[in-house]
Amino acid sequence: MKEIKKAVIPVAGFGTRLLPATKAQPKEMLPIVDKPAVQYVVEEAVNSGIEELLLVTGRNKRAIEDYFDYAIELERELEEKGKTDLLNVVRNVSEMVSIYYVRQKVANGLGDAIYHAKGFVSDEPFGVLLADDIIDSSKPCLKQMINVYKSYPGIILAVMKVPIKDTNLYGIIKGNKIDDRLYEVEDLIEKPNPMEAPSNIAIVGRYILMPSIFESLKDTKPGKNGEVQITDAIKNLLIKEKIYAYEFEGARFDVGEKLGYLKANVSFALKNKEFGKEFKKYLKDIVEEA
Ligand code: UTP
């Protein structure tokens, strides 16, 4: 069995749900406390054993490439001033992992973004992480999925139960429970109305995919919102591949929308070693006053 050493992070979307903050900067660079959202996801990949990462970028996303590059002048300045701690923080960001970039010229959907990884992936299974979904867990979510893959080689989708009224926001699976937290997928539907949803088990932004996804994506017509949907391409593989859905352990924040972004900031700030306690007190005080 081939090990999973490569992963793809698509970051070419417009981020319209966070406008106007995302008018002139990538949503993936918005900070969650003191690190850009994309760094949480890159760290998750690295801590899951990923050795090579491909970021699918687009126009207005250059800040992401700069962020993971060396910042020569800044580093020199920090060195001269003896700010070694900060220097290490800054340098570590650019030395975490080998990152490659490809541009999606037109934002034709997540499926199309993943199709741009064809050359990078070649003939290996690979991970996909969406920077919109930050998952806080003691064992990185992708690592949990890679462990599942070792016993159940196939496509693995990260899932969580959502309120039935929210099924129209997610890809939803129909599945048979086969193990602890694990379902064998029989069908999947992109953003069904609650009335038509086969379950309340929703796909979130972590996938283990096979190279067969590229053949399928090539044949997948634009679906909901006129975009090439990854859910549709995975669905087309139901007859060919084993597809599993894994209920990961951890808390997931949708930082691609305003409320989720705020919740992530509050949650991570409360855990912050430097000022978490003080922040908690501050929150308590203002909530009591409100
Ligand atoms: P979303 O649909 O959540 O991202 O795609 P978006 O389009 O940026 O968001 P809104 O709806 O306008 O606020 C999920 C992920 O897929 C990437 C996005 O960057 C995000 O990480 N994506 C989406 C692409 O890379 N290319 C696309 O064409 C669409």
Image (spheres, rainbow, N blue to C red):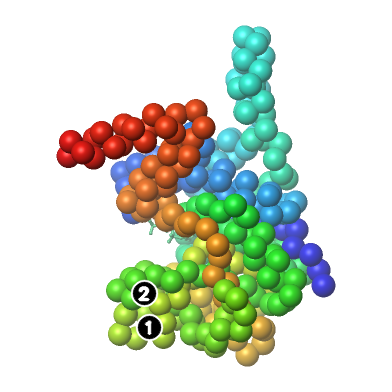
Relative to 222, is 249 above or below?
above
Amino acid type of the residue tagged 2 in the rendering: Thr
Relative to 49, is 213 above or below?
below
| Residue at the image point whose x is 49% and y is 65% from the top | 204
Out of 79 and 278, give the one closest to the viewer. 278
Amino acid type of the residue tagged 1 in the rendering: Ala
| Residue at the image point whose x is 37% and y is 36% from the top | 280
Instruction: State the image coordinates of residue 139 (x, y, percent, origin top left).
Output: 63, 55
Q: Earlier in the sequence, mark 2 or mark 1?
A: 2
Find numbered disc 1 in the image and state the secondary structure of the residue it sits on: loop
Instruction: State the image coordinates of residue 125 (x, y, percent, origin top left).
Output: 72, 68
Q: Which mark is residue 197?
A: 1
Instruction: Report if the CB atoms under discs 2 and 1 are less than 8 Å apart.
Output: yes
Q: Which mark is residue 10?
A: none
| Residue at the image point whose x is 51% and y is 37% from the top | 35
Q: Which mark is residue 167?
A: 2
**What is the spatial separation of the Cα atoms under label 2 and label 1, in whole angstroms?**
7 Å
